[in-house]
Image (cartoon, rainbow, N blue to C red):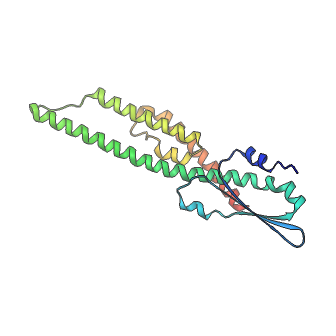
């Protein structure tokens, strides 16, 4: 007997773990419990996602099983992805904040050391500060782009540089902010629709 069950799962192209339980009834009906989980998600909220339950005869399940579970599984995979990206984004934000604090502290120490040497008023080298600021911006925008590729829009918005820090990039930052907010709203709408079913 040949079946295309695994080909259909492979066609979904969603990496994860499948837990499928099939119970047969006396009246030739089946109850199928299908739970899709992420390969890795550090957020304990992921454990609150219940399995999908389907009930029907063998022909009914043959015809409708994958049609019924495809959209919920895709939405669940997106939710896991956003949970994981949020945790990674939070870690990246902490790291970026620490790096920024370290840079400020280093600049203060250099300024203090230089002022002790000759007693003059110290003006930091504008070119060095500008280069550090540009590099921090470029690094943040590269991280934002990576998160967008992974559909982790909330995380990308959280680490997007602020217009107050980069006023000369206001147009680009506002455009990126609007894009990310739109994507987050679409995701939330999809999640509400998923939970309503």
Horizontal relation, residue 63 to residue 189: left or right: right
The quarter of the picture where residue 139 lies is: top left
> Residue at the location (25% across, 28% down)?
125
Q: Position of residue 81 (x, y in %)?
A: 59, 50
Horizontal relation, residue 111 to residue 136: left or right: left
The quarter of the picture where residue 49 lies is: bottom right
Q: Nearer the viewer, residue 18 or 127?
A: 18
> Residue at the location (80% across, 52% down)?
67
Quarter of the picture holding the C terminus: bottom right
Up-down relation of residue 39 to residue 44 (above or below): above
Outermost residue on the top side: it is 127
Up-down relation of residue 163 to residue 88 (above or below): above
Q: Nearer the viewer, residue 127 or 18?
A: 18
What is the total number of numbered labels drawn onto the structure image?
Answer: 0
Horizontal relation, residue 57 to residue 197: left or right: right
Outermost residue on the front side: it is 1
Q: Position of residue 165 (x, y in %)?
A: 38, 39
Outermost residue on the bottom side: it is 26
> Residue at the location (49% across, 33% down)?
171
> Residue at the location (46% across, 50% down)?
90
Q: Position of residue 137 (x, y in %)?
A: 42, 35
Q: Position of residue 21 (x, y in %)?
A: 74, 64
């Amino acid at each position: 007997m040949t079946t295309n069950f695994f080909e259909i799962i492979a066609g979904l192209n969603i990496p994860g773990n499948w837990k499928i339980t099939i119970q047969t009834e006396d009246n030739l009906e089946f109850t199928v419990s299908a739970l899709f989980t992420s390969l890795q998600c550090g957020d304990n909220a992921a454990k609150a996602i219940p399995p999908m339950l389907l009930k029907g005869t063998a022909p009914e399940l043959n015809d409708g099983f994958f049609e019924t579970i495809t959209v919920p599984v895709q939405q669940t995979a997106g939710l896991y992805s956003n949970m994981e990206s949020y945790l990674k984004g939070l870690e990246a934000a902490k790291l970026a904040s620490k790096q920024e604090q370290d840079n400020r502290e280093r600049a203060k120490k250099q300024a203090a050391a230089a002022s002790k040497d000759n007693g003059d008023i110290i003006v930091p080298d504008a070119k060095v500060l500008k280069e550090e600021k540009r590099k921090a911006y470029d690094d943040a925008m590269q991280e934002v782009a990576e998160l967008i590729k992974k559909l982790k829009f909330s995380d990308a918005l959280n680490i997007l540089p602020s217009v107050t820090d980069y006023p000369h990039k206001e147009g680009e930052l506002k455009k990126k902010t609007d894009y990310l907010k739109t994507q987050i709203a679409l995701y939330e709408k999809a999640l509400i629709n998923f939970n309503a079913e």
